[in-house]
Amino acid sequence: MAAGRTQRGEQTRTTIFRAALDLFRERGYEATTMRAIAERAGVAPGSSYHYFPSKSHLVLEFYRHVHALHVATCAPVLARERDLTARLRGVIRAVVMTCEPFHDVAGSIFSTVADPGSALNVFGADAKPLRESVIALYAEVVGGSDTRLPSDLTAELPRLLWLYQMGVLYFWMLDTSAGRLRTLEVVDETCDLIVRLISVANLPPLRRSRRRLLALVRSIAEEIAAG
Amino acid sequence: MAAGRTQRGEQTRTTIFRAALDLFRERGYEATTMRAIAERAGVAPGSSYHYFPSKSHLVLEFYRHVHALHVATCAPVLARERDLTARLRGVIRAVVMTCEPFHDVAGSIFSTVADPGSALNVFGADAKPLRESVIALYAEVVGGSDTRLPSDLTAELPRLLWLYQMGVLYFWMLDTSAGRLRTLEVVDETCDLIVRLISVANLPPLRRSRRRLLALVRSIAEEIAAG
DNA sequence: CCTTGGACCTGAACATGTTCAACTTTGAAT
DNA sequence: ATTCAAAGTTGAACATGTTCAGGTCCAAGG
């Protein structure tokens, strides 16, 4: 799918991606034309397509880039904290901070990634490696905490937290408050609520519901993985 | 924004919209070109733009159309049922049923409506009348039930259920299971869970969290309404 | 009947994402 | 050194959403 088997090719690929990254940041996604990317990279307009199937695939690369930053940012928190709320809050805050420089571009990126018709849909095949990687991060959040969880939660919670992260990022994208304080407020409030819900979900009035819901989540996840 | 001040203009507007509706249904959104719409409507390619600012604004009209169908479909259920779970499930099932004929188109529509950069974003100004209308439907779901709710829930629950509807529709859109059974399964499970959560949220371990969360939801909603 | 102003309509032109047939470069096998 | 196939590169061409300067239609006022 992606070329770049020669050193020269790899070089060109990188050059094109960096040009795209710069321009996305300078002007936003829509305002960046493929011709402009090509020009800045010093190649012909058609060259991008040898390395990236479409303009939006450049976005996937961008997302990979951001995810790597996110993982790096999380490391200290995950090494230090054992409390589940603190770990979760740390990781979610980190993703918001990491994305902050790209706030203006984020809209276009999200719309590409949310579009069910797009090849890059978050639930789709192209995004799978990255998705698994993010879910693994949340497995680490859960696994490294001192909270003991029932096995069905251990299995499915990371996936649900990944979903939660998507929700937070969507809110953050639309957030126009000064210093994006609204988002931080929402993060603090919801992280707390989630952990509280996890405990309550073990009590009689909810335990049955929890089991049923997680079984459903599991079977859906398996279906996606299979198809 | 929308012309159509003459009878003749109104006629043309309708013709164009119906042509678009047909073509969207036949070929999907992306595959429908503005030229094809114009051709089927028997007008020039530029004519659409006299009535609809863009191709995606045709989608807003489409969404209005679907919402009207949805409201009509809900009426019997809301007249009959008093149980909150039954009312909620009825309305959510209705929206899924109403949208079913447009399943193939739904993806493009959703991506337009979810795009924060789009003028048509669900949280944005252009979509406000429709949004309020949907929220009002959920106020009816809650208000007409025999369940007594704390005042903060009465105020904010409709908005949250609107959000829930969006989530269900997103799932439905990606659902490729036979007869869309997966979606119905998810709907039944989550409607039940929501109502259960509402009761549990009144008990000591969660009451405080509920109040804080709803206060946050409220202040955010006010901010959106103001800006 | 003529004039006038605004709504309505047209279709050529533009910008942009994408394709592709043809061309060049590269590096290893002969 | 020569060959050759694969990788890399090019830029003209295409389809499509959108714009806009110019034209047509029609009802009301003179």
Image (cartoon, coloured by chain):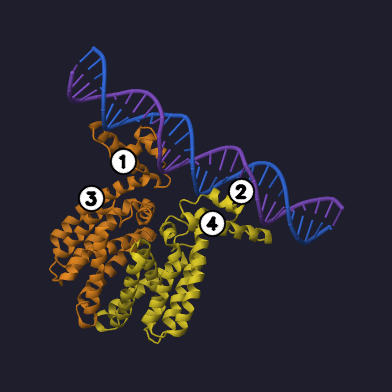
Chain colours: A yellow, B orange, C blue, D purple
- Camera-side residue: A66 or A39? A39
**B155 displayed left or right of A19:** left
Q: Are marks 2 and 1 in contact (CB under 8 Å)?
A: no
Q: Which mark is residue B17?
A: 1
Q: What residue is disc 4 on? A: A20
Query: N-terminal of the two: label 4 or label 2?
Result: 4
Residue that appears at 41% across and 59% down: A114
Q: What residue is disc 2 on? A: A44
Whether residue A113 is visible: no
- Amino acid bearing label 2: Ala
Q: CA distance from mark 4 to mark 2?
A: 14 Å
Q: Chain of mark 1?
A: B
Q: Nearer the viewer, mark 3 or mark 2?
A: 2
Crowd tier of the residue under label 3, counting other residues whose Cα lies within 10 Å: few below 14, some 14–19, many 20 or above:
some
How far from the left and from the top, in percent, is residue B8?
25, 31
How far from the left and from the top, in percent, is residue A103?
42, 62
**B125 displayed left or right of A139:** left
Q: CA distance from mark 4 to mark 1?
A: 38 Å
- Does label 3 lie on the same chain as label 4? no
Residue that appears at 52% across and 53% down: A54
Circle 4 SS class = helix
In the depicted structure, whether residue D12 falls above or below residue A17: above
Q: Chain of mark 4?
A: A
Q: Which mark is residue B68?
A: 3
- Amino acid bearing label 3: Ala
Q: CA distance from mark 1 to mark 3?
A: 16 Å
